[in-house]
Amino acid sequence: MSIKSYQELLVWQKAMDLVEETYRVVKLLPREELYALSDQMRRAAVSIPSNIAEGQQRNSTKEFVQFLSIAKGSNAELETQFVICVRLQYLGQSETEAAMNLCQELGRMLNALIGRLSVSQ
């Protein structure tokens, strides 16, 4: 894989879309969640492209796969937090649908990239 910059990776671009969507949705949460759930959701969302970028800049494929795995965990954490928002009736299904779809797509992309990189090691 001849990638010069993490910014060329579609998975990183998709993760950045998820950050934007998360920040948009978090603004809809009730005020009492301003420093609790919403803060945790923003941190999880930002962690995903950050770990993809950091891993891609590391010196080995093994390290890249490790950081992609961390990104995958943060994606699952964020997806869970969106489910929590719906279950607590802070947000409706329709308000989280785009973000949930992005989480699921991103999860598939991360799995595929991890699989491809693991084979090439």
Image: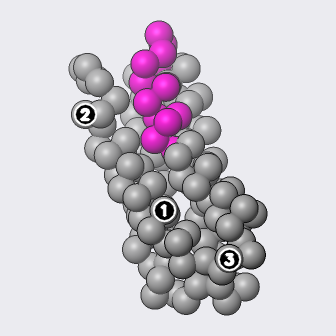
Q: What residue did someone put label 1 on? A: 23
Residues tagged 3 and 1 counted as in contact (Cβ below 8 A):
no
Q: Residue at x 68, y 56 (%)?
A: 40
Asked whether residue 93 is drawn in magenta, I would say no
Q: Earlier in the sequence, mark 2 or mark 3?
A: 2
Residue type at mark 2 is Glu
Asked whether residue 55 is drawn in magenta, I would say yes
Residues tagged 2 and 1 counted as in contact (Cβ below 8 A):
no
Percent of width and height locating residue 6? 34, 29
Mark linked to residue 90: none
Percent of width and height locating residue 77? 65, 57
Q: Residue at x 71, y 72 (%)?
A: 33
Task: Give the residues drawn in magenta, as a range.
Answer: 48-61
The outermost residue toward the top is 59
Q: Earlier in the sequence, mark 2 or mark 1?
A: 2
Q: Nearer the viewer, mark 3 or mark 1?
A: 3
Mark linked to residue 8: 2
| Mark 2 Cα-neighbour bin, 10 Å: few <14, some 14–19, many ≥20 | few
Q: Residue at x 49, y 25 (%)?
A: 55
Residue 79 in the image: above or below residue 117? below
Q: Which secondary structure lies at badge 1?
A: helix
Quarter of the image with the N terminus is top left
Q: CA distance from mark 3 to mark 1?
A: 15 Å
Residue type at mark 3 is Arg
Q: CA distance from mark 2 to mark 3?
A: 37 Å
Residue 66 in the image: above or below residue 107? above
Total label count?
3
Q: What is the magenta segment's predominant secondary structure? A: helix
Is 101 left, or right, of 79 in this rendering?
left
Percent of width and height locating residue 118? 48, 28
